[in-house]
Amino acid sequence: MVYPLQLFGKEMESMKKNLLATTPGIIVVGAAIGLIAVWLQKLGNPANMGICVACFERDMAGGLGLHRAAIVQYLRPEIMGLVLGSLFAALVTREFKPRGGSAPLVRFVLGMIAAMGALVFLGCPWRAILRLAGGDGNAILGIAGLATGIWVGTLFFKKGYSLGRSNSQSVVSGALFPAIIICLLLLYLLFPQIPGEPKSGPLFYSLTGPGSQHAPFIASLGLAFIIGIIAQRSRFCTMGAFRDLFLFRYAHLFLGLAAMFAAASIANIALGDFKIGFEGQPVAHSNFLWNYLGMVTAGLAFALAGGCPGRQLFMAGEGDSDAGIFALGLLVGAAMAHNLGTASSGAGIGAYGIQATVIGFLVCLLIGFVHSKKA
Amino acid sequence: MHTIDTRGLSCPQPLVLLHQAIAENTSDPMDVLVDNQASLENVTRAAEKKGWNVAVRDEGEGVFRLELRR
């Protein structure tokens, strides 16, 4: 059947049903994410880390014992909430669609590189925004790096970069990533944190450091679930925000990102948590060059994979197993970043952070060139 | 009739293909095949911004044909 869209002016009919996909809609969603993130910080999450997909995947890797950095081990319910919220929204709106098969191993490696680059800076794009909203000047370098990396990615897209088409897959294939998430949720519930104990059953729990700072379980899961729903509906993406601006001069997604920053900034100022400066910022270091370059590498990896870490989780919740593979790459990359000494800390960059950043960038360039067909 | 098949392609490739097609063709009717709602919204938003009228035809099995007309 044909929908007479002209009857509805410039907005098409399906967008009438999906108000969050309009530009005012994504601004509301971005602002809501910014406010929820600051709220989670008030409820116990680390400073300027209300939600950080890279940091929280790193904490999950630690909680599972994939790395043994004692200060960053906690099975973050936020990650579960983001995926399950998206799954819920996709099922309700019949957008759940099992798909995949577009260069999965390349996506896994891009996920690993993205995690390692982000952990040189100490944050995914979401946390870069939250750090800036908390007054952390180092985030300017991170966001500049992110924009640079994404800009390099747009050069490949202009040359016809593609990892190939995905195909429809079985329900099992599409449901597997959400199922893994549900298993992690069950593990968390079966083996909850025992006060003062570093282990509960097979799970690791930090006693000090960022991994020990967390909001109550229900708040973490519930608030992230809400974000998962509204982000799935609006297609909120921090990488796409810059990419669409560079590639098409479209500000749609960027306005969502700007709203997230504005809302988090205002909330921080109102709560007296806005502390401007470069030194002594929470879970941050002030090595300008590697704050910048770490995020150049991560930004390029996000661009080549087609989404920021958050967006990848939402797409995985919709049944996109390629996005699920990327998210698992993030998890493994975050674990490797600590096992191999490439992750930064408040004291500065890791022993091998420079090598990881440079090698990761070169691998991304190789992936970009090989998958760009047209001249 | 020029048809752009974006099925199975992820962001931003449907829009890249749309922009290339619009750059070469400013008036002839064009169809764009999409297989997910995000692409449907993105292509429609972009085409309308460039002055095209867009009609959506449900082809079944999750595929939509976007009819771009001047």
Image (cartoon, coloured by chain):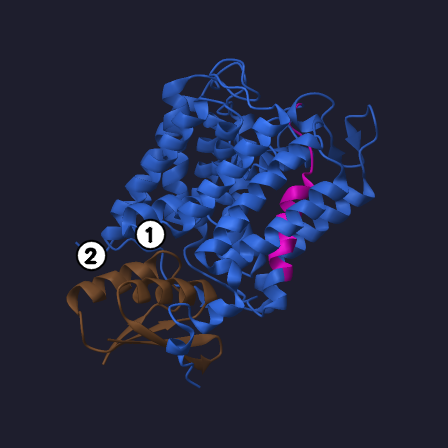
Q: Tell me the crowding category of disc 1: few under 14, some 14 to 19, or many 20 or more residues within 10 angstroms, Cα based.
A: some
Residue A28 position within the rendered picture, expressed as x and y whole percent measured from the top left: 53, 50
Q: Is residue A168 visible?
A: no
Give the amino acid type for the residue marked by disc 2 in the picture.
Lys
Q: Residue at x 47, y 54 (%)?
A: A24
**Which hue belongs to chain B?**
brown
Residue corresponding to mark 2: A374
Q: Residue at x 55, y 35 (%)?
A: A264
Q: Which chain contains the residue that carries disc 1?
A: A
Residue A93 position within the rendered picture, expressed as x and y whole percent measured from the top left: 59, 68
Give the amino acid type for the residue marked by disc 1 in the picture.
Tyr
Question: Which is the main secondary structure of the residues drawn in magenta?
Answer: helix
Which one of the lettered chains is coloured blue? A
Residue B18 position within the rendered picture, expressed as x and y whole percent measured from the top left: 27, 64
Q: Is residue B3 visible?
A: yes
In the image shown, does A105 or A322 lie closer to the viewer? Answer: A322
| Helix, strand or loop for disc 1 | loop
Q: Which residues are magenta?
A: A71-88
| Helix, strand or loop for disc 2 | loop
Q: Which mark is residue A159?
A: none
Residue A172 position within the rendered picture, expressed as x and y whole percent measured from the top left: 61, 65
| Quadrant holding the N terminus of chain A | bottom left
Q: Quadrant of residue A223?
A: top right
**A199 horizontally vs A373: left or right:** right
**A97 horizontally vs B46: left or right:** right
Q: Which mark is residue A250?
A: 1
